[in-house]
Amino acid sequence: MTSAAERAGYRPPQARVRARGGLTARALGLLVAVAVLVVVAAVSIAVGAKPIPLGVVWDALFADGASAENVRIVIDLRIPRTLIGLAAGIALGLAGALMQALTRNPLADPGILGINAGAAAAVVLAIRVLGVTSLIGYIWFAFAGAAAAFLVVYLLGTSGHAAASPERLALAGAAVGAALLAVTNAVALLDTTTFDRYRLWTVGSLAGRDLTVLWGVLPFILAGTVIAVALGPSLNVIALGEDTARGLGANLDRTRVLSAVAVTALCGAATAAVGPIAFVGLAVPHIARALVGPDQRWLLPYSLVLAPILLLVADVIGRVVARPGELEAGLVSALLGAPIFLAVVLHRRIVPL
Amino acid sequence: MTRRLTVRAPGIALRLDVRTLWVSGALLITAFAAVVFTVVAVGIWLPLADIVEILQGGGRRADRFILLDLRLPRVCLALLTGAALAVSGAVFQSLSRNPLGSPDIVGFTTGSATGAVLSIVVFGAGPAGSAVAAVAGGIVTALIVYGLAARGGGSVRRLVLVGIGIAAMLVAVNSYLISRARLDAAQSAAVWLVGTLNGRTWQYVYLLGIALAVLTPPLLLLSRRLQMLAMGEDSARSLGVPVPVSRLSLMVLAVAVCAVATAATGPVAFVALAAPQVTLRLTRSPAVQLLPAAITGALLMVLSDLVAQRILAPAQLPVGVVTGAVGGVYLAWLLSAQWRKGNG
């Protein structure tokens, strides 16, 4: 027997926000995920155009047994690539989870605040106007573009007396993003050389980056990660709705400003390092939400661990399937992540944001 | 308190919002002025007297060609596609109750892009072939998304999420094809993806006009239900709206409208998103109304094409580049003005 309220689609709040699994189950799950991440990272060092057994990897790092070629591949290519994938994955997962918590919009990916659009516009202008040609040369332009775009979006979203509401940020991000995309398209379509370089950058890949890239973006990713994880409890309060959160004494403005700063640092750094791979940031928080429920204190760590797993697995598969060439991680992560994402969306009760 | 005007005729009574009426009127007049300016002044100057003469069957041959074969079909196509995209955006934003809603939600735009890019890059198709492939790709994608989402009860939220997943895969396919294709094929695919009015003839206008003439009346008949659905499905149900049927038929019509526009010009960015939002803010009404949104979309498209033809002349930008810039900047300005006053 159902009440009129239930027939109309209303479910009591406890049922809607009930967490999945007990505390132990969720902690164990996180531990398993971390173990999987370690295995995936090891595989990412061992597998590639030239497979190198893990024993040889060990020798290359800590003993003298490996050949010079293997040492070079492991130290100069595989390890930097794996570390960058790890860092970028962490950044994208956290940025996506924060974005969805902040805007409470299921369409929110890290690109929604105009961050990817800003990075792309800056990269295209750097190629066209300044003649920058190297992947490493793009980094700081991408980062500056991302930060500038976000600043404009945020100033626009907070104009007037009220704070940036989720809907405002989403709309402001869409408007600014569209204008920046127009700049990108105009520059890229009128100049063949620029278009040629831009089309390769825009796929998103872990290949061809060295450790200077990692050292450049790492401080931003670390800072963003610390802020993000610390914000978990405040984001839980925001999820109750604006009025309730105010009534409970939450400092909404501070939480929003801090989340926004963290998203920019994380997503700007990831985009600078590996190109625009937005889907990882969109899909992973949805998958994590299906696993552990909407509690940000669990959602953020799960996103932090699951996103680099997806990115690294995608990268490894991309190296293996198209030998001797490779498929970019940006492509494979979407082709791999989307079915998982769909399976989660279709087979689980959807957890509200 | 909004002022309303009631129009009564035998068998019909319409309550019209006064502000919506005069905003629509002003938009129409602006659109007309933009059309006249485009026809007269973009490129070689054609004085109004000459235009009138040409329309009556006279004038020099070169001028006749410029007006009748180049400018008029182009501006007519701009008006029609702008209106069509705006209407489809308005329907999806109301149904999903999400300001970012558009036919993209069911993966239509990405699917049509995949169809077109495949046809251009792999099969070397021309404009007609890529238009057909685009519509086919878009409709197949929309069907897959709807089919997958419908198994779970077909709520709009589920639809949105399934659409995101499918679209992400297709985006990956698209950028793979573009990054691996020969440079010239990749570039013509990229131009198609941005959306352009260059080189469009009367045929496009006729086909689009006929399609819209068929699709618009049922949409307008359903627009009252759409406004109720925009208040939430539960409220709509309690007001007696048959929710699943109305939702499905509105979505099918909106996708069809978007499909014919996409076939004509490619997936022009941002009109579907911006036009309803701009209209909402100009009319200050609680729900998007289809006709004012259509007028805004048409105006946005004509103005954008004007800029696209002139800004870097003689280089012709695809119109889709400019709709993003014009629509984005205008929407940003509108939002900041509204928020500074403390509304919304």
Image (spheres, coloured by chain):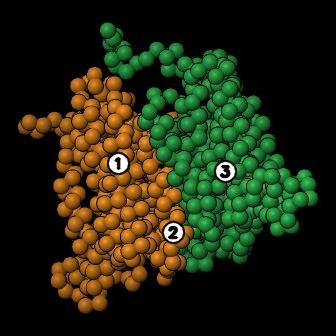
In-front residue for pair A319/B9: A319
Residue, disc 2: B178
- Chain drawn orange, letter? B
Q: Secondary structure at mark 2?
A: helix
State the count of labels.
3
* Residue that extends furthest to the left in the rendered view of this protein: B10
- Do callouts 3 and 2 mark residues in contact (Cβ within 8 Å)? no
Q: Amino acid at mark 3?
A: Leu
**Numbered label attached to residue B144:** 1
Residue A201 left/right relative to B235: right
Q: Is residue B169 visible?
A: yes
Where's residue B8, x and y in %?
Answer: 14, 36
Q: Secondary structure at mark 1?
A: helix
Q: Residue at x 43, y 56 (%)?
A: B110
Label 3: how many Cα within 10 Å (few below 14, some 14–19, many 20+): many
Q: Is residue B78 above or below residue B234?
A: below
Q: Residue drawn 47% across and 76% down?
A: B185
SS class of the residue under badge 3? helix
